């Protein structure tokens, strides 16, 4: 029987590959996972450098992909995406490049869709209550106050219950 210690680089490689098969990850997230699993920092750096070299770890592609999916699936605004990418350890330059792909007009259209959908559940409430709830909802999605109030004002003006006789 072979009682030799497993190669730490091989162990680190397997951890990284397992993490990447579950979901895309930033380099920082992979570093944290390797540290949590007891890998030495020099081993983690070597393995992650190699994974970056062959294209398996790519923070720029990761940031672009995350930004695109968060806009499409959750309706998040650039500010919320920026916060999430920073939390995941993505460099500012990659965040900026990823957000270059987010069109402000598309973001505003996304906010309109979110407001229209949410308004369906708010029939009969006072205009001020609707405005407050919608503003909070859009703020949690990362929309600026200017965009939020513009979209909310438009949506409420179109509702028959708020039309002036």
Image (cartoon, rainbow, N blue to C red):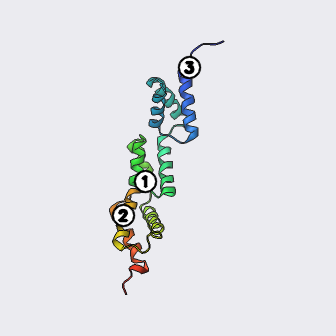
Residue 162 at x, y percent in the picture: 38, 79
Instruction: Provide the secondary structure element on which disc 2 rests.
Output: helix
The residue sitting at 40% across, 61% down in the picture is 137
Mark sitting on residue 135: 2
Ranked by sequence position, the earlier of labels 1 and 2 is 1
Q: Residue at coordinates 59% horizontally, 13% vertically from top-left?
A: 4
State the residue in front, 93 or 47: 47
Find the distance from the CA under tag 3 to the CA under tag 1: 42 Å
Residue found farthest to the bottom = 165
Q: Residue furthest front?
A: 124
Q: Position of residue 5 (x, y in %)?
A: 56, 16
Quarter of the figure with the C terminus: bottom left
Residue, disc 3: 7
At x 40%, y 43%, the residue is 87
Choose the circle earlier in sequence order: 2 or 3: 3
Q: Up-down: is 8 above or below 137?
A: above
Q: Quadrant of the N terminus?
A: top right
Q: Residue 122: which quarter of the image?
A: bottom left
Residue 143 found in image quarter: bottom left
Residue bearing the label numbered 1: 100
Q: Are marks 2 and 3 in contact (CB under 8 Å)?
A: no
Q: Secondary structure at mark 3?
A: loop
Q: Is residue 6 above or below residue 148?
A: above
**Mark pair 1, 2: CA separation:** 25 Å
x and y percent of residue 82 in the render? Answer: 40, 49
How much space separates mark 2 and mark 3, taking CA atoms? 54 Å
């Amino acid at each position: 029987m072979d009682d030799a210690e497993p190669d730490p680089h091989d162990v680190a490689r397997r951890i990284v590959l397992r993490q990447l098969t579950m979901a895309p990850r930033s380099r920082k997230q992979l570093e944290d996972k390797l540290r949590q699993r007891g890998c030495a920092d020099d081993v983690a750096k070597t393995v992650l450098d190699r994974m970056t070299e062959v294209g398996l770890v790519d923070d720029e592609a990761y940031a672009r992909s995350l930004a695109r999916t968060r806009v499409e699936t959750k309706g998040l605004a650039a500010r919320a995406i920026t916060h999430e990418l920073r939390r995941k350890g993505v460099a500012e330059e990659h965040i900026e490049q990823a957000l270059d792909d987010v069109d402000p007009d598309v973001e505003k259209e996304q906010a309109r869709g979110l407001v229209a959908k949410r308004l369906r559940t708010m029939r009969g409430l006072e205009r001020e209550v609707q405005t407050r709830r919608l503003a909070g909802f859009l703020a949690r999605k990362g929309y600026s106050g200017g965009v939020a109030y513009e979209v909310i004002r438009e949506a409420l003006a179109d509702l028959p219950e708020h039309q002036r006789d």
